[in-house]
Structures are given as C-alpha cells and as structure tokens.
Image: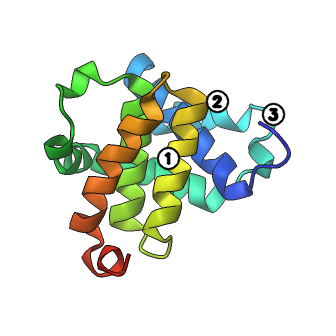
Amino acid sequence: MSAGKSPRHKAREFVVQGLYQWQVGGQDAAAIQVQAEGVAGFDKADRALYDALLAGVLQNAETLRDLLAPYIDRAWNEVSPIERGILLLGACELKLHPETPYRVIINEAIELAKTYGGTDGHKFVNGVLDKLAPQLRPAETSRR
C-alpha cells in the first residue's frame, strides 16, 4: 500500500482483504483481525473505520446481499470474491454510514475494484452501487 493513500482508504483495503479471507477461507472476524494486525501498514489505517466496516459487513451480509441482488445481472456466486467483497463493503457504507457522502463511497469502491478486481470489475461495481445509492440515500442522490 502506497504512502499516498488516506487512512480511510487503507482501512477499506484491509476490509476487502478480510472479506476475501472470510468468503474464500471461511475465516471469522477474530482470525481476520489477527491477520490484518500482522500486516505492514495496518497501523496507518483508520482502525475505527476498519472495525466498523468489517463488523458491519459480517453482521449484515445477508441483508446487504439482498439489497444488491436486484442490480446484479448474474448469480451471486458468479461474481468474483473480490468484487463481492467490494460490493458488500459499498452497500454497508451506503446503508450504515450516512456521514460518508455516497459519491465518496462509490469512488472508493471503484478504486478498490481497479486495484484488486478483474479487468472491468470497476465498471461493474460502479454500475451496481450507482443503482443502489438512490434506494439507500434518496435525499442525497436526488440532489445530483
């Protein structure tokens, strides 16, 4: 992780990595936390945001998947684990963190998908979250 990234962006990167471990390796929050704390650069991440987002996704995964499903053009298990994690993270922030502007959430998700996802994953993530945002943030998105 480069030095130019904000502590909040670094926190989101670690959450995406943790969600990958959860989906692919079946690790729980405690194991994910121990792993993250041992990675160089974790001390530069916004710990409060990391904790809130990781817990928010893990505790609300089914609800978040249900919110995302109408905007995804394939079966959930056909979406790559990285993109699933980024979508869950974005949906969690849109739903549970109104203090963060929806445009920031979507832009962060796009950047994460460009860094960690497949070739056009960022376009897919953008499309899905852009459709979900008005449902979860009607007042905010109506001002665009």
Foreground residue, 51 or 74?
74
Query: Alpha-carbon distance for marks 2 and 1?
Result: 22 Å
- Please provide percent x and percent y for residue 36: 66, 35
SS at mark 3 in the image: loop
Query: Alpha-carbon distance for marks 3 and 2?
Result: 11 Å
Q: Which residue is mark 3?
A: 40
Question: Horizontal placement of 7 versus 95: left or right?
Answer: right
Q: How is the image coloured?
A: rainbow
Question: Horizontal placement of 43 versus 61: left or right?
Answer: right
- Dot label at residue 109: 1
Residue at 50 percent of width and 70 percent of height: 100
SS at mark 1 in the image: helix
Residue found at the very far front of the displayed protein: 144
- Please provide percent x and percent y for residue 124: 36, 36
- Please provide percent x and percent y for residue 78: 25, 19
SS at mark 2 in the image: helix
- Dot label at residue 47: none
Q: Could you tell me if residue 141 is visible in this image?
A: yes
User: In front: mark 3 or mark 1?
Assistant: 1
User: In front: mark 3 or mark 2?
Assistant: 3
Mark 2 residue type: Gln
Foreground residue, 70 or 88?
70
Marks 3 and 2 in Cβ contact (< 8 Å) = no
Residue at 72 percent of width and 51 percent of height: 45
Residue at 75 percent of width and 31 percent of height: 39
Mark 3 residue type: Ala
Q: Residues within 10 Å of mark 1 (few under 14, many from 20)?
A: many
62 above or below 101?
A: above
- Dot label at residue 35: 2
Residue at 61 percent of width and 32 percent of height: 115
